[in-house]
Structure formats: C-alpha cells, structure tokens
Image (cartoon, rainbow, N blue to C red):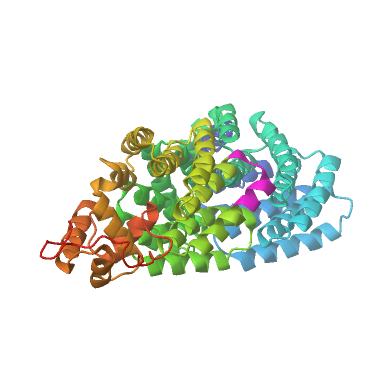
Amino acid sequence: MEVSAALARARESHRRQAWADTCAHYATADAGETLGIDDLARYGEATQLLGRGEEAVRLLQREYRARVEAGDVAGALRSVYWLHETLAMRGEFAYAGGWLARATRLADGAPDCAQRGYLLLPEAEGRLRAGDHGGAFETATEVRELAERCGDPDLLTAATHVQGLARVRQERVDEGLALLDEAMVAVASGEVSPRIAGSIYCSFIAICHDLHEVPRAREWTMALNAWVDGSPRFTGGYSGICLIHRSELLQLTGDWPDAARQARTACERLTQGFGEMLAGAAFYQLGEIHRLRGEVAAAEEAFRQASRYGADAQPGLALLRLAQGRLDAAAGAIRRALAETPDRLTRVRLLPAAVEIMLATGDVPAARECAAELHEIAEAFGRPALHARTGCARAAVALAEGDAETALAAARPAWRIWRALDAPYEAARARVLVARACGALGDDDTAAMELEAAREVFARLGAEPDRARAAGRPHAGLSPREIEVLGLVAAGLSNHAIASELVLSEKTVARHISNIFTKLGVGSRTAAAAYAFAHGLAYAEIPMPAAPGLRSSPEAGAPPAP
C-alpha cells in the first residue's frame, strides 16, 4: 500500500514538474519494488533535470536495459540519447561515445526504426560545434525526416532547432531564425518534454545574444513565462546554462543586479559536478559585470575562475588590463584571442574590444582593420545591433584619425539603434562618441548635453568607470594645456621632449603631468596614455616641429608659458 501511494505521488509530482518531489517519492517506491519502464523514465528525467548526474546515469541505464528486454528498440534508442547527454554533461565523453556505439548496433538490427534519429542528433550537434555547418544542416535534415516518419515531437523539434542554428552560422540568418522560431512554437505550446524544452530555450537565448536579437528573445521569454517561472524547480546543470544566457540578456538590457544574481547562481549550479565544462562561461559572465562596475579585484577573480574551468576569459580580461593601463598585456591578449577564433559570429565578441585596445596602444591601422572586418560581418548577418557595433567602432577610429564628421555620421545612427533595442549601456557609450565628435567640431553645448545624458545612464547602471570618464567637464576637467601635454605623453615623448615641443620648462611639464595623474586618477604615464587613446586625445602622429620663426618663443627673461 505504501509503495502504491508513493508511486501515485511520484507520478503526480512529475505531472506538475516538481522534480525534487518526484525523486523523493520514486526513491520510496523504488525501495519497495522494481519500477516499471515508464516510471524509470520519469524518475531518470527528474534526476537529470535536477543535475543529479550519477543517479541519472544509473536510472537511464536501467531504463535502457528494461526496454531492450521488452523489445522496445525505439524507446531504448531514446533513452541512450539522454544517457549520452547526461554523461557528456559530466565530462565523461568516452563513456558517452561508448553508449552511442552500443545503441548503433541495436539500431542496425532494426533498420526500419525511425528513432535511430536520436543517434544522429549528437552527430549533427558535433558537426555544428566543429564548424561543419553544412554537414550539421544535412544531418539535422535527415533526423527531421526520421522524426516526421515516427511522429516523435521531441526529435522533430530538436532537429529543426539544429537546422536553424546551422543556417545562422552559414550566414543565412533569416532562414535560420525562421527555423528557430518554428522549434520555439513547439516549446511554447507544450508539445515537447521538459528536457527538450529547457535545452532548446537555453540554446535559443544564446544565439539571440550572439545576434543581439533582444526583441525576439524577450518576446519568446514572455511566451514561455510559465516555464521560465518554474525554473526554481529546475535547478541542475541545464538551468545553470539557461541562467548564463539570461544573465547576458539582462546585462544588455540594463538590469545589472539581476544579471549578477543569475550569473552567480549559474556559477553555483555548474560547479556541482554536472555541467562543469560550462562553468567557465558562468564565471566569465560574472566577471564582465564586475568589470563594468569597476570592481577590479572581483572581476580578476571571476576571470581567473573562468580560465580554471576551461573558458577563454577574453575579451573581458583584455579590457580589464586596458583599464589598469597595462597596454601590452591587453594588446597581446586580444591578438591571441582573435588568432584562435575563426568563427565570424564569435569574432563579433572580440572585434569591438580589439578596436578599443588597438587605439589605446596607438595602432590606428590595426584598429581600422578590425573595424572593417566588423563591418563585413555586420553586412553578412544583417542584424541591426551588429551595425550599431560597427558604427561605434568606426566612429572611434575616425576620431583617432581626426575625422570628426565621419565619426558623428557613424556614432549617431549607432546610438539610435541601441536606444531602439533598449540597450542602455551600449547607447550611452555611443553618446560619448557623439559628444567627442561634436566637441571636435566645435559644438561644445551639444557635446556637454550628450555627455550629461550618458553620465546619467552610467550612474543608474552602476558603470562607475564609464561614469567617471564622462563626469564633470569634458576630459575629466583637464585644461587645454593639460590636454595638449597628455596627447604628447600618449605619443611617447619624454618630459624633456614635451618641454621642447611646447616651449615650456621641464619643471612646468612635470607639474602638468602631476595634475593630469590626479584628475584622471591614474598613477603612471602608461595609464594616462590609455585614457588619452580611449578618449581621442592622443596624437595620431607626433606633431612635427614648427618652422623657424613660426613658433612664438618666450621673451628674454620671461618665464615659460603655463
């Protein structure tokens, strides 16, 4: 009687997707008698969703053996797919591959079984990760045909989703997004199992983040509110992955406190032995939020943890080094990351940082090259946010080259796009570029108003480094003479050379540099140079000496000009 009651409670808990209760009641029932195949499947699903990897593996193996004994080849192949996924999440890739090989022999004895598509699905996903986007699409198409033949909604939806991902990576973006939306319809309408729903939703949010498809991600998240709101009961590795991508979108749309909470929770869930290979991405995301807030020590530690768990901490760590004035470290890191990243959509994450860092080091040609590549990618993928990123990069390069009109023509449309996408931080950064361009064109009033608007956004978000750069008078209250001295410091001139260039005494130059350090809050010439390049105050070229008789020189006995 007690076993029967526990089974009834377990089945009801599973129906309500109360996974912890499901496991507790099934554990009671399993202690009293051997569970049937369907109950084993429900129990295994609940443990997997909770991230109880070892327990899930044991139950999925039991389910597989029970189905084979019952002659249910289709069900056995489906259980092996989830066993493979669970083992892979535990980092046991050889073990996972061995089970696929075993299931392949089983499928060979039943060539008419369309559920063998479950064995092809990992192949399609693997080809996608390896960059064989055409091969991934072909394999996913074969899986979809098999799924349609056997009427399996999980298999059909997963195959359609992989087709969409492959098309996006092939730069056939509209076609890919249509396929992704088709898969999301099945998720939103409850046609698929919770495991498939969670996996597809998380992957969908990730690709939306890569493309900056914020409205699409927001729309589908609202449509899935019932599922998303149930996420506290969905606490394993899969939920950790979802939390990473939701944190990224929350960061983009300006809810940094919630973005930090979700990233921190993802770090906790993905370091429990299930999904640890993805924990690095969670720590990286947490590090980015700390970096944007100016929390240097916390960002450094998060990036260190990201690297420990196998993630590349770029471009965040390079940008952190830039903020610290460690220009060589920043430039070396971003160059290395670009050299190791052939995928064009992934390079979009790196190229804006590369532009900023190359300008800070004075390598304007390299920055121009990175901005041009970003433009090419934006044209290929055709997403508004990618065009906005390109506009900001091109504006920064134009400012470094002294072309304020071109800079303004690029920065203003970029700001409008970010504003329309409800991306406040990116919009404020674009407004700073607009302000710099307006200032260079002599429109000081507009420059001041743009900076004030950007500063208010930075303050509201908690973007302290950006707020400090935009605070007070333009360029942190530097006087025109200090701006001139700073530009020459960034050009690499010594105090003696600066004194000669500006017809000042070395003592006066030293006083100006001391004032500059104080106003910028830096402690070295390198850090001051980084500020100059980041704000368009560095000379693209070292000024040439004026011709004799053209430079005013101090009168005999008069003190040097201040």
Q: Which residues are magenta?
A: 375-384
Q: Position of residue 358 (x, y in %)?
A: 46, 62
| Point 63% across, 63% down: residue | 342
Which quarter of the image is occupied by the N terminus? top right
- On screen, residue 481 versus residue 33, left or right, reads left
- On screen, residue 77 versus residue 519, left or right, reads right
Closer to the camera, 186 or 19?
A: 186
Q: Position of residue 540 (x, y in %)?
A: 43, 61
Closer to the camera, 515 or 188?
A: 515
Q: Position of residue 40 (x, y in %)?
A: 63, 46
- On screen, residue 357 versus residue 85, left or right, reads left
> Is 475 covered by the magenta stretch?
no
Closer to the camera, 500 or 291?
A: 500
The answer to whether residue 170 is seen in the rendering is yes
| Main SS category, magenta section | helix
Is residue 254 placed above or below 343 in the rendered structure?
Answer: above
| Point 31% across, 48% down: residue | 465
Q: Position of residue 73 (x, y in %)?
A: 79, 51
Is residue 501 placed above or below 267 in the rendered structure?
Answer: below
> Is 383 covered by the magenta stretch?
yes
- On screen, residue 82 versus residue 119, left or right, reads left
| Point 37% across, 60% down: residue | 322
In terms of image quadrants, where is residue 302? bottom left
| Point 49% across, 57% down: residue | 355
Closer to the camera, 331 or 559?
A: 559
Which quarter of the image is occupied by the C terminus? bottom left
